[in-house]
Image: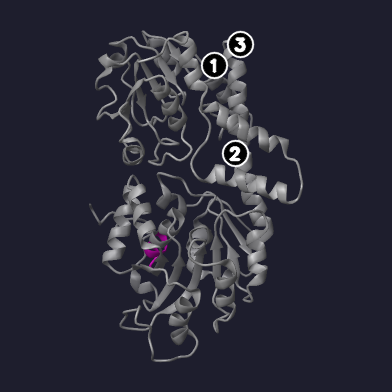
């Protein structure tokens, strides 16, 4: 693996510009924690990352498709700009190891920190979702409250129930407590999306105190839009943004069903809608729905919040229902096309991740599709360049499951093609598809109208057909 990918990057700072004795202490094993470590190292910061090392290794493996991030992680580990260590059994042990230097001016250095000079902590960054299995909430809050270094900034990140992060901040005695939601992170391009964030939100326990986060200043300055507010407001904004994106997707998917009955191409309708500046073009593509970790987790937390406050949210319930039902829609189109006579067929499936560019399959439509196909003893030939490792780990024991090296390999054995996630950068070879003249069931609406017209076989998309 090449490790020189960042040398010419615009934001790779000379390390001599920073105090090499300073460290940022990150606690977590999530992709957000890994990306933050790499980005901060790119900005010249030394990182101590504490995590469950087994889970951290699994995460790095699962995000192997993030080639840029992986190369930088490896390079910074070799340079010891990032030092990953096992999370201690208690928060007290971690904090006390640094406080000997930061607050007591002692010459003693914890044995876990093998440095020529004692490390001076710039900030603590806690990734809440990663900490739950190791530290109880009461325990780590008490540990930080007993710290002698109350002037050190503490950042929290994670998707929690509304108001929970704000409540944690109030329980912490220190003034410089912040919340950074990762609304900007893009699976498949995590490094660049954090280095050049589309929207940087910062929740502050103490108003107008972002000057205490000089380490993050380059990210704030590089963001296309920023907003600082109290933590409860930023939490609510984060959740509202994600819920709105999910709403737009679900609305277009519901309209796609009506478009089917009217013989209208929903993709053309989406384009027209996007021309209206009041609507905009983002998240208007009909398809099999949304997956991944962020949107489903966000909707789940919103439901919990509504239940906690005994509030009904029928729109939210409908969004979740539409999304789950939409994942089976492409199978129903397949079943109807063959009038139910689908037993013992062989089909091809292109893609498997929850979105093009990612290798994660959490919440992807491929899972319900495979279950339904296998229930009819249908053999599945699957091409997925990025999601292959996850699919193998999940389904390698299934006799009807087979991975293929090329989307056009063994086409003569199949009676249909399903498209789940196809990168727009990869040109579809219509001529090769036409050699078999089989129907295409496009759950992503990946084909253009020109390509659909070129097909010899039939086409069924989401809200569009030939």
As drawn, 74 above or below 463 = below
Q: Residue 396 falls in which quadrant of the image?
A: top left
Q: Which mark is residue 262?
A: 3
Q: Is residue 305 left or right of residue 103?
A: right
The secondary element bearing badge 3 is classed as: helix
Q: Residue at x 55, y 25 (%)?
A: 271
Q: Is residue 411 left or right of residue 439?
A: left
Q: Is residue 45 visible?
A: no
Indicate the position of residue 64 as horizontal and vertical percent values.
Answer: 32, 47
Residue most toward the left? Answer: 1
Sooner in the amino-acid sequence: mark 2 or mark 3: 2
Indicate the position of residue 141 as horizontal and vertical percent values.
Answer: 58, 72
Q: Residue 11 falls in which quadrant of the image?
A: bottom left
> In this view of the protein, which residue sits in the foreground, 236 or 411?
411
Q: Is residue 152 visible?
A: yes
Q: How many marks?
A: 3
Q: Which mark is residue 102?
A: none
Indicate the position of residue 432 as horizontal and vertical percent values.
Answer: 28, 16
Sooner in the amino-acid sequence: mark 2 or mark 1: 2
CA–CA distance in space, label 3 to label 1: 9 Å
Q: Is residue 378 left or right of residue 165?
A: left
- Chain part drawn in magenta: 39-44
Q: Which mark is residue 265?
A: 1
Tell me the mark number nearer the camera, choosing from 3 and 1: 3
As drawn, 107 above or below 350 = below
The secondary element bearing badge 1 is classed as: loop
């Amino acid at each position: 693996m090449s490790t020189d990918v960042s040398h010419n990057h615009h934001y790779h700072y000379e390390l001599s510009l920073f105090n090499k004795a300073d460290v940022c202490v990150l606690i977590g094993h999530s992709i957000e924690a890994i990306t933050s470590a790499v980005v901060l190292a790119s900005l010249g910061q030394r990182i101590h990352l504490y995590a469950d090392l087994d889970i951290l290794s699994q995460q790095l493996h699962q995000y192997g498709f993030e080639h840029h991030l992986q190369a930088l992680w490896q390079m910074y580990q070799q340079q010891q700009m990032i030092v990953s260590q096992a999370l201690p059994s208690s928060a007290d042990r971690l904090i006390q190891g640094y406080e000997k230097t930061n607050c007591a001016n002692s010459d003693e250095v914890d044995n876990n920190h093998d440095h020529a000079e004692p490390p001076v902590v710039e900030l603590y960054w806690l990734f809440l979702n990663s900490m739950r299995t190791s530290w109880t909430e009461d325990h780590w809050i008490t540990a930080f409250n007993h710290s002698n270094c109350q002037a050190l900034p503490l950042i929290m990140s994670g998707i929690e129930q509304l108001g929970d992060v704000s409540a944690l901040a109030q329980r912490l005695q220190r003034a410089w407590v912040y919340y950074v939601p990762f609304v900007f992170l893009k699976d498949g391009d995590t490094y660049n999306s954090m280095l050049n964030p589309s929207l940087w939100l910062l929740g502050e326990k103490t108003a107008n105190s972002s000057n205490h986060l000089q380490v993050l200043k380059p990210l704030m300055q590089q963001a296309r839009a920023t907003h600082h507010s109290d933590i409860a407001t930023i939490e609510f904004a984060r959740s509202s943004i994600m819920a709105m994106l999910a709403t737009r997707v679900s609305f277009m998917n519901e309209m796609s069903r009506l478009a089917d009955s009217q013989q209208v191409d929903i993709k053309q309708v989406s384009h027209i809608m996007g021309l209206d500046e009041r609507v905009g073009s983002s998240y208007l593509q009909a398809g099999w729905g949304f997956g991944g970790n962020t949107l489903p987790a966000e909707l789940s937390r919103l439901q919990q919040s509504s239940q906690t406050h005994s509030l009904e949210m029928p729109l939210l319930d409908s969004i979740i229902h539409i999304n789950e039902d939409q994942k089976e829609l492409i199978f129903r189109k397949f079943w109807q096309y063959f009038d139910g006579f689908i037993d013992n067929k062989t089909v091809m499936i292109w893609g498997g991740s929850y979105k093009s560019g990612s290798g994660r399959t959490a919440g992807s439509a491929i899972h319900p599709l495979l279950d339904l196909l296998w229930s009819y003893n249908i053999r599945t030939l699957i091409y997925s360049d990025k999601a292959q490792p996850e699919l193998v780990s999940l389904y390698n024991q299934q006799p009807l499951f087979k991975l293929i090296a090329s989307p056009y390999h063994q086409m003569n054995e199949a009676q249909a093609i399903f498209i789940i996630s196809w990168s727009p950068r990869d040109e579809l070879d219509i001529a090769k598809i036409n050699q078999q003249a089989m129907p295409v069931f496009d759950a992503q609406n990946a084909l253009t109208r020109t390509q659909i017209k070129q097909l010899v076989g039939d086409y069924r998309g989401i809200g569009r057909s030939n």
